[in-house]
Image: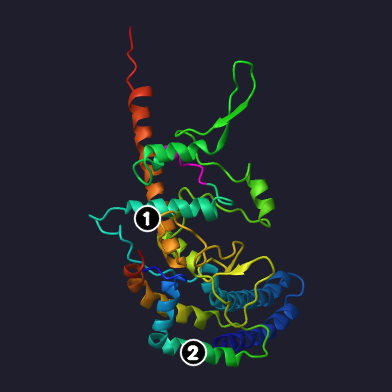
Amino acid sequence: MADEEPVDQKKYLEESCKPKCVKPLLEYEACVKRIQGDDHKHCTGQYFDYWFCVDKCVAPKLFPKLK
Amino acid sequence: MAGGGVIRQLLQRKLHSHSIVPSVSSFFNSKKGHEEAGSFGEKSLRALALVGVGLSGLLGTAVVSASDEAEHGLASPTYPWPHSGILSSYDHASIRRGHQVYTQVCASCHSMSLISYRDLVGVAYTEEEAKAMAAEIEVVDGPNDEGEMFTRPGKLSDRFPQPYPNESAARFANGGAYPPDLSLITKARHNGQNYVFALLTGYREPPAGISIREGLHYNPYFPGGAIAMPKMLNDGAVEYEDGTPATEAQVSSHLLISLKRLKVIIILSLASSTSLFMMYIHPYKKKHHYS
């Protein structure tokens, strides 16, 4: 019943939560486009916003999946 | 920015009006009004300098707050730990597996020097199992009757072995970074259990525009973003003795449960031993005064 190659539950849930967090993801990608070529800028803010959204979505679902 | 310009203009106007007065008054009071006339110009200059300092401070804080979020690290989410409820307890199987994770993955760099083998009895292992585990390590003891130190197999009362003899050796072996002792780590970090879990499972590609130097790794949850520890927990990296499938998330959750539970043991034993000590060994009594 256990797979030979167990699939990590967290990665799987993060993928499935992506559609819920489309808005911050688009903001991040827009930022990436904006700063192309500029060495002094970075997109940490948008990156954090996206992952904060994904984490909030994943957290309640994760533990029921873990043994 | 616009506000600064307005302030500058106001001050310049004031300076202009004052610059006429000092020159006129200095002409009349060339002998005794010297200091007064000079102070007008000085005061305005000082005010301008103060405004300049204030402005640069304001602008400076604007820049600092942009990098502030990386300095604090991404906030970790609140996970629904199975032992979170008032009436919930710890799962012994998880604590056992967590300890296995620690010994297989973490113990080569992180000490857990406040925990003894006897703390595992009844929590994760039976007494025989814990005794057998303790006997696998060599402990320096002594001096014996001849005054020499000797090594012997470990006992239940011995603490967990340390990977390095001291902090300098630990730093030297890890590029200058000190792998912290894990005995109380969930208490020693803000939002400890959630933070450590998020950290261990949160190694990701850095955002656009951020590059991490050679030797460090990007982790958004770590304050500053650049952590010396590489990603240690990978799917299938840990083999549990009972054959439970070990994905990264599972391994991390077991590790965190055991870290939290063992921390509770230390704190309780510290508290009880302190109070027992105060009651029986070092009681506070009013000294009898005999006349």
Looking at the figure, which quarter contains the C terminus of chain B? top left
Quarter where residue A44 is shown: bottom right
Q: Do tags 2 and 1 sit on the same chain?
A: no
Examine the rendered structure and indicate whether residue B57 appears above or below residue B263.
below
Residue B94: which numbered mark, if any? 1
Judged by its main secondary structure, the magenta piece is: loop
Which residues make up the magenta segment? B112-118
> Which residue was labeled with disc 2?
A27
Q: Is residue B84 above or below residue B57?
A: above
Q: Nearer the viewer, residue B278 or B262?
A: B262
Q: To which chain does the residue with label 1 belong? A: B
Residue at the image position 36 percent from the left and 78 percent from the top: A57
Please provide percent x and percent y for residue B8: 61, 86
Residue B187 visible in the current orientation: no
- Measured as percent of width and height from the top left, residue B230 is found at 59, 64
Q: In the image, what residue type sits under mark 2? A: Glu
**Viewer-nearest residue: B43 or A22:** A22
How many numbered dots are placed on residues in this image? 2
In what element is the residue under mark 1?
A: helix
Q: Could you say which is closer to the camera, residue B151 or residue B185?
A: B151
Q: Marks 2/1: CA distance?
A: 40 Å
> Which residue is depicted at the point 26% across and 59% down?
B85
On the image, the x and y values in percent for residue B188 come to 46, 53
Q: Secondary structure at mark 2?
A: helix
Q: In the image, what residue type sits under mark 1?
A: Ser
Residue located at (48% from left, 68% from top): B201
Q: Residue furthest left?
A: B87
Whether residue B193 sits left or right of residue B199 in the image: it is: left
Image mark 2: chain: A
Q: Are marks 2 and 1 in contact (CB under 8 Å)?
A: no
